[in-house]
Amino acid sequence: MSPNIQHKLRNNTLTSMLSYAEHLTEIEVNKLQKYFYQNQILVYYFLVRLGISTSLRYSDLSHIIWEYLLGRDFLAIREQKTNRAREMPLNLN
């Protein structure tokens, strides 16, 4: 049963009134990525793609800067919640 969720997009910031984690279906993720790409909201497009491919939490994704990604084969990060070090291969294709 899905709750009634209100989403707002203001100044390129997506906010939700959701109080617990709910996972998106593959179709919903594809629609979200398509929306961000078509509307040239590329920061969120890449954030969603990177989050899905690495399974990182938003708290970890929000600290990644372009220098960590560009011209590199791996992303090395220490997860905030678990303090676990991870090294993930980057496939930018």
Image (cartoon, rainbow, N blue to C red):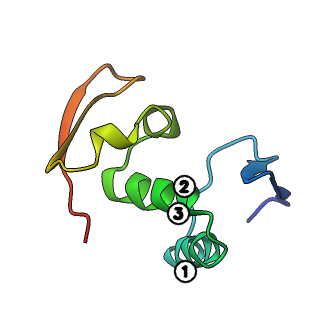
**Neighbours of disc 1 within 10 Å: few (<14), some (14-19), many (20+):** few
Q: Nearer the viewer, mark 3 or mark 1?
A: 3
- Mark 1 → mark 2, Cα distance in angstroms: 20 Å
Give 20 or 67, whichever is nearer the viewer: 67
Q: Secondary structure at mark 1?
A: helix
Q: Is residue 92 above or below residue 72?
A: below
Could you tell me which residue is drawn at 26 percent across and 64 percent down?
92
Q: Secondary structure at mark 2?
A: helix
Percent of width and height locating residue 81? 42, 23
Q: Specify the quadrant that holds the N terminus.
A: bottom right
Q: Looking at the image, do the residues carrying marks 2 and 3 touch, with CB atoms under 8 Å apart?
A: yes
Percent of width and height locating residue 35? 64, 75
**Neighbours of disc 2 within 10 Å: few (<14), some (14-19), many (20+):** few
Please give the residue where the numbered disc 3 appears in the rendered image. 45
Q: Secondary structure at mark 3?
A: helix
Q: Is residue 93 left or right of residue 52?
A: left
Please give the residue where the numbered disc 1 appears in the rendered image. 27
- Mark 3 → mark 1, Cα distance in angstroms: 15 Å
Q: Looking at the image, do the residues carrying marks 3 and 1 touch, with CB atoms under 8 Å apart?
A: no
Residue 74: mark in rendering: none
Please give the residue where the numbered disc 2 appears in the rendered image. 43
Q: Earlier in the sequence, mark 3 or mark 1?
A: 1
* Quarter-of-image position of residue 68: top left
Q: Amino acid at mark 3?
A: Tyr
Give 66 or 75, whichever is nearer the viewer: 66
Percent of width and height locating residue 73? 13, 51
Q: Amino acid at mark 2?
A: Val
